[in-house]
Image (cartoon, grey):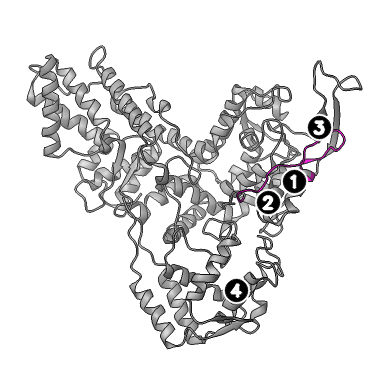
Amino acid sequence: MGRREPGWGVLAAFVIAVAATGCGRVAAAEDTVVRDESFFVEQVYPMLHTVQCERCHTDNGVASDTLLEFPGEDPNELQIVAFGLSMIDLVDRGDPRQSLLLTKPTRRTEHTGGRRIRPDSEDEQLLLSWVNYLAGLSDDQVRKARETIARAEVRELETLTVRRLTHSQYNHTVRDLLGDQSQPANRFPKEDFINGFKNQLEAQGISPLQAEAYGKAAERLAQAAFRGGDHQGLIPRNPESPTDAEAAGEFVRQFGLKAFRRPLTADEVARYCDLFLEEAGRVQEFERGASMVIEIMLQSPYFLFRVERGADGPDADYEMASRLSYLLWDTMPSDELFRAAAAGELSTPGQVEAAARRMLDDPRARSALDEFLAQWLRFDRVLDATKDRRRFRQYNAEVAAAMVEETRRLFNDLVWNDRDFRAIFTADYTFINADLAQLYELPMPEEEFGKVAYPAESGRSGVLGHGSFLVATSNPAETSPTARGLFVRNHFLGQEVPPPPAGVSTDLPVVTEAAPMTNRERLAIHLNSESCASCHRLIDPIGLGFENYDAIGAYEETMRLQFGRGRGNASREGGPTSIELEIDPSGYIQGIENSEFSTPKELGRLLAESETSQRAIVKQFFRYAFGRQETVNDEPVLDGLYEAFRDSGFRFRELIVALITSELFLQKGTE
């Protein structure tokens, strides 16, 4: 699996030709002279990195909707040149000093990212030199520059050849392959969240600890496969002897087909048969030979990885069967899918769509999408959350599990009843048990996790009012407006806010009895430091709109602060001191006009109506389905998926089908 560098020979020739024919004319600002595009590569581009403009101006950054987008990781020189030339769209050729490229980073014009370049500094002079250079290009030179930009955007797709089974897929696969319900992958080293999910290619290497875990699991699974007999029918027929070569070959071919998700080659059959018969003959037990083959196959890359040879490969239909089953069922193909692959019935888009729609009607699809939901909304943070027991006596593991179930029920209601999925933000109802009814102060449901409508005056709606969201984005003893705002940006708007720069203190002022403060007052410290303000303006105002909901999701009219050491440690007045502060729940989304809100319900409406948020849902499912972050080459695919999603009335099942029938899902070597 490797990235092939695109061919830049044409672009190189173009840049050299431009320099030779005068595009590299002299343009000056103060004492700086720009002779050609190398000035941008060697001086301007490094300066822009130093002031951290790329922290927002990337394809998934908060400023991704603007005209300025930095190239991806490790760009080559010609990509950087094309990026520099693309800045011409932000240059006022009649009055260069009024160019947005200059006035925004210096914050002479309102800039979401704050002041990145100090006015009248050397950095500004560098940028002004480049602005003047771009402003001085002739119309013909501008046309050629745009040709360079267009060519630079055409990059070869990274061919995806293998994907490792996730822990969830491993558990489900051994369940369906061997009938084993022990979930061995739960004991494997934990998977990392990358791009919001645990199935991303960047994190799918195998460490020594992981390899050791695979070996131990394979040994245990093989030993258990025939414990008490062949209860799963793994051996096709009764052997005539412990070393029945025909029966061994039949087992190897049948089990190997399912374990490797493709027919074995003749060499593979012969090799595994030799191992089978050697072990069976050694102990004179046919099942021991089968157990040996199982143990070895479960450690093979062909079991642990899904190998993609592409549409021209000999096993293309089998690859498609696996691609469908692991996305839609989170497990290996069924016997029906294997039969369809063997018959060549997964070769056309129509055949693949028909199979996908049948699979979506199967109960296994629900559990598979539950896995997507759990990762997207980070249920792990809810289930693993610890809360201050003195403050939140209602909260325990059962309540956390109920919060997750509440969100799962809403998701399933929207997806499987083909409702408008935007109601994930706006639903005026929820599914709760008695514990959550008490916590939310709602009527008791008629049954466990029954459907309950929110009162008209309630500020809750959709997932934004669920404990799962509010708990996952809080600290043990208090809310975290920063975490809540960051979650909305990352998960619901599809925008990445970079982490704080190294060495920047993230500590907030300590609240004392003498100086009680609300979170809004404490967070104001972020806005007093330019290094903090540029990012915190993007997230804190969103999170502050949830301040009426405490760290376990209960509604609070005021913020209650308690001072004193509690039981047995009374303050001088004879007991703990309690102070109540007014809560200002007003919030807004920086970068979106008319986005003021003061309740989760109002924010839910904003997100549901926002095309950015609608597209973010598409983007999140794309990442989960393909195991990677999207690139500029994926934009036509993402546009097509969004249009299909929108035109269907935002039905999530139609988004799934659109993705499965996209050229990217169907084409050679991709998933």
**How far separated are the C-alphas under marks 4 and 2?**
28 Å
Q: Amino acid at mark 4?
A: Leu
Residue with the mark numbered 3? 560
Q: Secondary structure at mark 1?
A: helix
Which disc, if any, is residue 312?
Answer: none
Q: Residue at x 56, y 68 (%)?
A: 67
In percent of width and height, residue 346 lies at 27, 46
Q: CA distance from mark 2 to mark 3?
A: 25 Å
Q: Seen in the image, is 109 located left or right of residue 644?
A: right
Label 3 is placed on what type of residue? Arg
Residue sitting nearer the eye, 17 or 654: 17
Q: Earlier in the sequence, mark 2 or mark 3?
A: 2
Sequence-first disc among 4 and 1 = 4
Residue identified by numbered label 2: 536
Q: Which residue is mark 1?
A: 523
Disc 1 marks a residue whose amino acid type is Leu
Q: Position of residue 465 (x, y in %)?
A: 66, 38
Range covered by the magenta-colored residues: 501-521
Q: Quadrant of residue 427?
A: top right
Mark 1 to mark 3 CA distance (whole Å): 17 Å
Residue shown at 25%/46% (left/top)? 317
Magenta-drawn stretch contains 504: yes
Residue designated by label 4: 126
* Element at label 3: strand
